[in-house]
Each structure stands twice: as structure tokens, then as C-alpha cells.
Image (spheres, coloured by chain):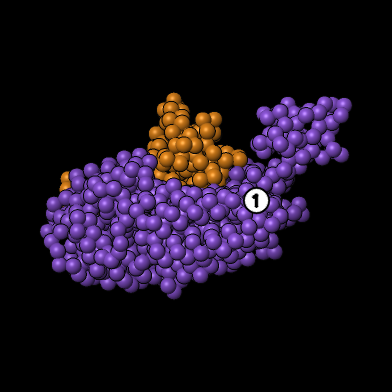
Amino acid sequence: MWKYKKVILVKDTDTGKETVRFSELFNSALRDRGLDGEVQVVRPADINVYDQGIVVKVMPGNITYSKVEEKDIDLIVRKSIKKEEAVKEIQIDPKDKQVRIVLRNCGNIDPENIDDYIAVDGYRALKKVLEENNRDNVIQEMKISGLRGRGGGGFPTWMKWDFAKSQKNDTKFIICNGDEGDPGAYMDRSVLEGDPHSVLEGMIIAGFAVGAKKGYFYIRAEYPLAIKRVELAIKQAREKGLLGNNILGTQFSFDLDVRLGAGAFVCGEETALIASIEGKRGCPSPRPPYPSVCGLWGKPTVINNVETLANISPIIYKGGVWFSEIGTKRSKGTKVFALTGKVENSSLIEVPMGITIKEIVFEIGGGVLNNKKIKAVQTGGPSGGVIPEKFFDTSIDYESLQNLGSIMGSGGMIVMDEDDCMVDIAKFYLKFCVDESCGKCAPCRIGGRQMLELLTEISEGKATFEQVDKLKLISKAMQRASLCGLGQTAPNPVLSTLKYFEQEYIDHIKDKKCASGKCESLFVYRIIQEKCKRCSLCQRNCPAEAIPGDRDKGYAVDQKKCIKCGKCFEACKFEAVAR
Amino acid sequence: MKLTLNNFDEEAKKGKSHNNNWIKVGLSTCGIAAGADVAFDTIKKVLQENQSDVEVIRVGCAGKCYAEPLVEVKIEGMPQVVYGKVNEEVATKIVQKHVLGKQLINDHIYLLKDA
């Protein structure tokens, strides 16, 4: 048995320096009252409250105190330990901002064991659907739920299903789009690896609703563990009679296969993905016709994203109304985000629609890394844009993000601080799209390349303001004339950085300065003689022998020889190298 | 045994149920990259050395990427705890101090759930 009855968690959430001292103070206060045998004082690594001074949590009861001072210790011990009361004056009530629907089982069940999934009400939605045996009801339930595609587009899922259902065709297909490719996004991988059966169940239900007998998992080959676990899940589901002929003993038959993506980003686009499954080169084709009318091998096909499909089972099992009560008026349910970049707690989070960016970054993410100043968050990857700090109170939903010039996207959220240069960011994402453009249509193939060259000139300080106008012009052409989403959205990172951080572009063009210190070509390294201690470290670290001089005369950078590698800047211990 | 609409409820109950005392290790790509497989093996080994019947369960990613590898521990009568940054040393400690010694471990708790 546990020898204690209670736990006191103590953590200094500002600097961390006072944690040990305060936990000792609690220990001695407990000893004074003879309670040290009953209560364990623990120093946690994370107390899930940030920048609130000394935070103390008493368990059980989950009583949380913030900004605890020495004088409060005795009171906390007297009230919350000896009795079951709280010290109201310093008590806070931190709410868990996350709502886990898609990630409900991730981290809780063994993904390689179908019994684990069934034990947490898995496949009960499928059972319900097959018991009722009414395809219209399923689509109606999806309509009530208000679920929209989580791959980024936000198209109502029920509508896709309904289009495919209404097609008169004996052969139809369901495809799960697991070709996750945005830089910094890993939501789908986590779901496929942590709870593959939830996606399987969603696909089987979709198959029933639209009248498909066959489905494909399209997963990128770079996700070997996800592939392994999905294949295992398919095998287990077949053994249990949940896949294959006569599912659960009914007339409904449906089977699944896995197809691997070979690493082309454009294959996340549905028409390119279909071409890839058909064994053709992964190039998009014009829509309409949409895949729900004429998709895989010319048959009606529903393509849903991994996260969308993981939502199906809870919606059917708990009802569309339940789901529609979460989120905002037009964006229902939750969204999974991969929160990364310059944030304390890089994490995979699931939040209800309507939450603000501020809540995500500061209350869940724990704020900016190393207490730097935050500049923006980037959502939607190469198709999205940056959202500057002044809009952090915006609620997360499809429309409001679009209004800001970004998109919901598949769920990457990258936090950027003062050290991130917006020209550099725009260049990074554009370069990504240029590399990944399939080359089929001219606006994307040529436009992307031209824009990248213009941006490179800006980042090297060789541009005039004419280049900015050209950037805007080409952006417009690409948005309007590109064949698929890749080219249409590729200018977004450029346009949104131009919109919100125009000054940074001006600095690069006019003053030839990069304030964030990212655009290497703009650096001019020089030695500040007043600070220089003549230690010769810069000279010894310079690979280009560009720092002549000696300990008597001092040192200076020969700009003609300097290759701007920054070695001298890093080597100097006295901040005597400026750039 | 194939499931049918009729036998579903009955068969669902028969599935392998887990021990009341368990340790879950997040073994997705992210966790493994951070060394979760080492934590998993270490915990199993040390449990075995001490003839403990605590079950070690492989699970997916729990979401706290910054604290990988993640290990959740449930021992009856004790608070349920998520430990993070579990290397070989911490993994050993989790078995010796938490499971066998019935004490919570400092500096590695990332979430404490009310029992």
C-alpha cells in the first residue's frame, strides 16, 4: 500500500529556482505538525500552469494555488492538508483546455491489440450502423454533426458522402488520405500509430454509407510504423469479422488495402493521390468532375483525411448532436494541432474549435521558448500564412483563419519569435512548394520559381521595391491559374508575411538589414575595437583567413575575404563581433 | 471467433483485460526516437528481476512531445502519474521507487491524475 494519503506538488513556474526551497519549507511545515508521514511533497517537472510564480497543487482534490508566498505555507497545510478546505485568496482553477475526441485513445490503449480498442467502445458505432441498416440515417447523423474535412479544405464530410452515395454505380471506393506532408505536421501519423482501429472503423462506416465495398489506406512510405500498425489492424479486423465479407454477420461486405505514397507532397491533393493509387504519375487533374462522382478508376470515390475518419466513430456512437455542441457555429468539434517551433511545450494537442491562439500558445504551450518575444504563429504549412501577435485573440475556426489570410490547414502550428525573419520564412515555404511542384501546369511550375528568385534577391539585399510588386502580381496569377491546391496556395506564405510584416521586407530592400539575423548575405561582420580583448579566437576560428591582425595591433575583418559564415561571431566570448 | 451483431456484446467482454497495476509506455515513432524502446525494455527487465506482476503496456503517443519518452504508471492505492523524459536511469527508478517503494519521483512528473 501507498504509505501517504496526500501529495503536495510544488513548482516555481517563473524561474524554477525556488522549487527546492519551497518544497523544503512545506516539508518542515508538515514535520512541525507531525504530518510528514502522511503527505509526500513532490517536485514535478510540469504542473501545467505557467508564469504564475510558485504553484502548489494538493491531491487528491486537485486544489491549485498560484503565486504562493512563504506566509501562505502554514495556512495551506492547516486548511488543505489537515482539513479538506481551500485557501480561497490564492486558489486558482486551471481548466484543461483540451478536448480529446480524435486522440481519445492515443496513449491509452495498445494500438496493436484490437481487444484494447473494442474494450473502449470500439466498433460499437459500426455495430449500431449495421443494426439500423439505414444509409440515409448515417449521412443524416453526419450532417447534424457538422463535421468538416480536417485535411485543410474544410468541406462538409456529409456532402462528400452524399454525392458519392447518390451515384448509381456498383463500384465505389473509400480512400483514407494519410499522405501527411506539411513541414512540422504529424497529427495523422500519431493517430495511425496510436489508434489505427478508429480510422478503420470510420472507413468501414463511410463504406456502408456510400455503398462502397473497397477502401484504400494511402499512407506515405516515410511512416513505416504507421504502416505496420495499420496493416496489423486490418489483419485483426478481418479475423474478427469486422472487415471482409459479411461484416458482423450482415449482408454488408467491405475490405481494405494499404497503398504507399512515394514521398511526393502533391499526392496529398486528392486527384494526384488517385492517380498515384492507379499506378500513374502523381499529378493532379482538373476538377470537376470531383472524385465523389468520378474518382479512382473512374468510379465514385470518397477521400477523407485520417483525422476526419477518426471522428466518425464517436459521432455515430454518441450522436451528431453531441458533436455539434462542441466548437463554433460553423466549425464543429475539435482540431488536432502539432504545436511546434519556439514554444516551451512542443506537443500534439486537440482543442475545441473556437479556442484562441493565445490560449493554445500560452496556456497549453507554456509560452515562448527562452522568454523571447513572440512574433507570429504559422498555420496551414506551405498553403497557409502567418498570424501576427495582435490577432492572437482570434478564435480558431475555418472562416476566421481564412479572413486573416491563413488557413486551418491540416494542423501544423509553428510558433515564431523575434529571431525568425519573415522574408526567410516566406522563402522557406515557397522553396518547399517549388521543390514539390509536379510541373504539370505552368503557373505553378514557372510562377513558383520566379517568386523564389525574387525572394532570394530580397533576402540578399539586391532587390528594389519593383520586386515586391512583381511578387504580388505573380501571386495573383498563381492563385487564379494553377491547376491544384499546391500552386493556388503556394503564394499564401508570401502574401501574408507581406501583409503583416511589410516593414521587414522594406528593411531588407532599403536598409539591406535583417533584424532577426537570419539572412546571411546581409550580414557585415566587424570587430568592435572597444570591446575586443585581442584574444585571437575570431582569427583562429575564421576558415577563410579573413581576419588579419595580431594581439598587439588588434583585429579587423577583411570584407573582401569574409564568407559570412559567422564563426567569429559564435567564437567571440566578449560580444565584440557585430553583424 | 468472428464477431456478429448478436454475439458482439458477449465477445467484447471476453477480450483480454489488463492487470489493475500497469505501466504504459508511449511507443510511437516520436517516443521511440526519444528512447522509449529503451525505457520499455528497462522497465520490463527490472520488473522481472523483482518478480513483479505489474503489466507493461505498449501505447501510442500521448501528446506531450516535449517530455518524451512518456511513461504512465498506475499502482492501486497510489495517484496515477505520467512521467516524462524517462531514460534508462529514470525507468529503473520508476520500478524501484514508485512501483516497489511506493514513492512518487521528483523532477519527472508531467501529469498527476486524481485517483
Give coordinates of residue A191: x percent, y percent.
38, 50
Residue depicted at 30% across the width and 44% down the height: A260
* Residue at (55% x, 54% y) in the render: A454
Quarter of the image where one finds residue A157:
bottom left
Residue nearest the observer in this picture, A554 or A38: A554
Quadrant location of residue A103? Answer: bottom left
**Foreground of the two, A463 or A191:** A463
Check the residue under mark 1 and report the chain it is in. A
Above or below A47: residue A390: below
Is residue A230 at all visible to an observer of this figure?
no
Other residues around mark 1 within 10 Å, as few (<14) / some (14–19) / many (≥20):
many
Q: Name the residue carrying label 1.
A: A461
- Residue A561: x percent and y percent? 70, 34
Query: Is A2 in front, or is A138?
Result: A138
- Give the quarter of the image for residue A323: bottom left
Q: How many marks are shown on the rendered structure?
A: 1
Q: Is residue A199 above or below residue A575?
A: below
**In the picture provided, is A558 more to the left or to the right than A146?**
right
Residue B44, percent from left and from top: 42, 31
Query: What residue is shown at x 24% (from left), y 57% (from top)?
Result: A174
Q: Which chain is purple?
A: A
- Which type of secondary structure does the marked residue at label 1 adopt? loop
Q: Which residue is drawn at the image coordinates 36% and 60% (left, top)?
A: A483
Please tell me which residue lies in front, A503 or A412.
A503
Residue at the extreme bottom: A329
Query: Which color has been applied to chain B in this rendered view?
Result: orange
Q: Is residue A181 above or below residue A86?
A: above
Q: Is residue A299 left or right of residue B17?
A: left
